[in-house]
């Protein structure tokens, strides 16, 4: 299991009745300190957004340490559960200045079943040649470096949205069976789109990659804040360039069928601090919070 934290400029509060089981229980202590107790349930690929008091400086989760930054007096934190979770419970210690103990976050992974997709594609897309295999491995390493690069800028100002109001042809987590052979999991969302349909950004962000990849074809990757990325794949045309700062719903490309596909569509991916997560979950948690604060 991976648990990750993101700090943003947004003012998020999780205190509505619908989110009460996930809201922070804060108890005032001497010296205007807070004691935090929180129990969070997360399914594989799920994202939950929490807000911590400005006192928080650091979070220890297992053997890992996560730094907390104060931005505009707000501490906004994304918790994520990796698709490949071991379903192990995790206790995260929250520390303030001078290692003052501010409380505990308990993470409880939940079981979740995912559907299967039976797909037929060109044999060369399933059983790769040595040349294509080398290319796929090289591209995977390249993308890992892009996602791992340390950046401090935060561009998010509003909730995330699904890029297209379209039929979902394949949900996050679907097991992909190509030509009768299981070849992994679909760690994104496929949205029906004819060739040429304009593709908007799901939130404000910086373009950190544009190019053609073996599996995902013409692809655009946006950076939104520390550890938070979205990707737009199988495009027919790319309409932005690396280094561009794009607004929410700005067009980044046109839908197509490049890469390993069976037809035209948009593959929308969300990557948060080391995990490919469910974009629908990201939209839901930021929308719920925005109803109270944006």
Image (spheres, rainbow, N blue to C red):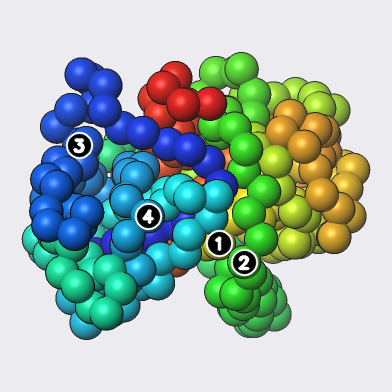
Of the residues tagged 4 and 1, which is closer to the observer? Answer: 4
Q: Secondary structure at mark 4?
A: loop
Please state the horizontal and vertical placement of residue 255, each as a whole percent of the image.
77, 33
The residue depicted at 60 percent of the width and 74 percent of the height is: 150
Q: Say which residue label 1 marks.
A: 226
Q: Position of residue 178 (x, y in %)?
A: 47, 50
Distance in Å between CA atoms under marks 3 and 1: 23 Å
Task: Tell me the number on the disc at residue 152.
Answer: 2
Residue 83 appearing in the image:
no
Rendered image: mark on residue 22: 3
Q: Marks 4 and 2: CB-CB under 8 Å?
A: no
Where residue 12 appears, x then y in whole percent?
42, 36
Which type of secondary structure does the marked residue at label 1 adopt?
A: loop
CA gap, disc 4 to disc 1?
A: 18 Å
Residue at x 82% of width, y 49% of height: 245
Residue located beneath label 4 in the image? 54
Question: Could you give the CA–CA distance between mark 2 and mark 1, rounded to whole angstroms?
Answer: 6 Å
Which circle's residue, 4 or 2, is located before the other in the chain?
4
C-beta proximity under 8 Å, tags 4 and 1: no
Q: Is there a contact, CB below 8 Å, between mark 3 and mark 4?
A: no
Using the rendered image of the protein, determine whether residue 66 is visible from the camera's viewpoint: yes
- Crowding at mark 4 (Cα within 10 Å: few <14, some 14-19, many 20+): some
Quarter-of-image position of residue 154: bottom right
Q: Are marks 2 and 1 in contact (CB under 8 Å)?
A: yes
Q: Secondary structure at mark 2?
A: loop
Which numbered disc flags the more N-terminal residue, 2 or 3?
Answer: 3
- Distance, label 3 to label 4, CA atoms, is 19 Å
């Amino acid at each position: 299991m991976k648990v990750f934290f993101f700090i943003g400029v947004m003012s998020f509060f999780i205190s509505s009745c619908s989110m009460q089981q996930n809201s922070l229980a804060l108890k005032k202590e001497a010296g205007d300190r807070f004691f935090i107790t929180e129990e969070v349930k997360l399914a594989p690929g799920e994202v939950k957004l929490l807000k911590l008091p400005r006192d928080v400086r650091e979070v220890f989760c297992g053997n890992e340490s996560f730094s907390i930054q104060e931005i505009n007096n707000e501490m906004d934190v994304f918790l994520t559960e990796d698709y490949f979770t071991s379903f192990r419970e995790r206790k995260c210690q929250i520390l303030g200045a001078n290692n003052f103990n501010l409380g505990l976050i308990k993470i409880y992974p939940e079981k979740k079943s995912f559907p299967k997709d039976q797909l037929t594609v060109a044999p060369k897309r399933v059983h790769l040649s040595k040349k294509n295999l080398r290319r796929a491995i090289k591209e995977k390493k390249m993308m890992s470096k892009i996602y791992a690069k340390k950046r401090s800028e935060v561009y998010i100002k509003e909730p995330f949205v699904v890029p297209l109001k379209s039929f979902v042809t394949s949900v996050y987590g679907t097991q992909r069976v190509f030509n009768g052979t299981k070849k992994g999991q679909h760690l994104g969302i496929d949205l029906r789109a004819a060739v040429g349909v304009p593709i908007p950004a799901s939130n404000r962000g910086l373009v950190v990659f544009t190019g053609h990849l073996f599996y995902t074809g013409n692809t655009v990757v946006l950076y939104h804040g520390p550890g938070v990325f979205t990707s737009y794949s199988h495009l027919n045309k790319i309409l932005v360039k690396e280094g561009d700062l794009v607004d929410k719903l700005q067009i980044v490309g046109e839908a197509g069928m490049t890469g390993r596909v069976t037809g035209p569509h948009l593959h929308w991916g969300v990557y948060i601090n080391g995990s490919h997560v469910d974009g629908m979950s990201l939209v839901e948690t930021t929308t719920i919070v925005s109803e109270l604060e944006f």
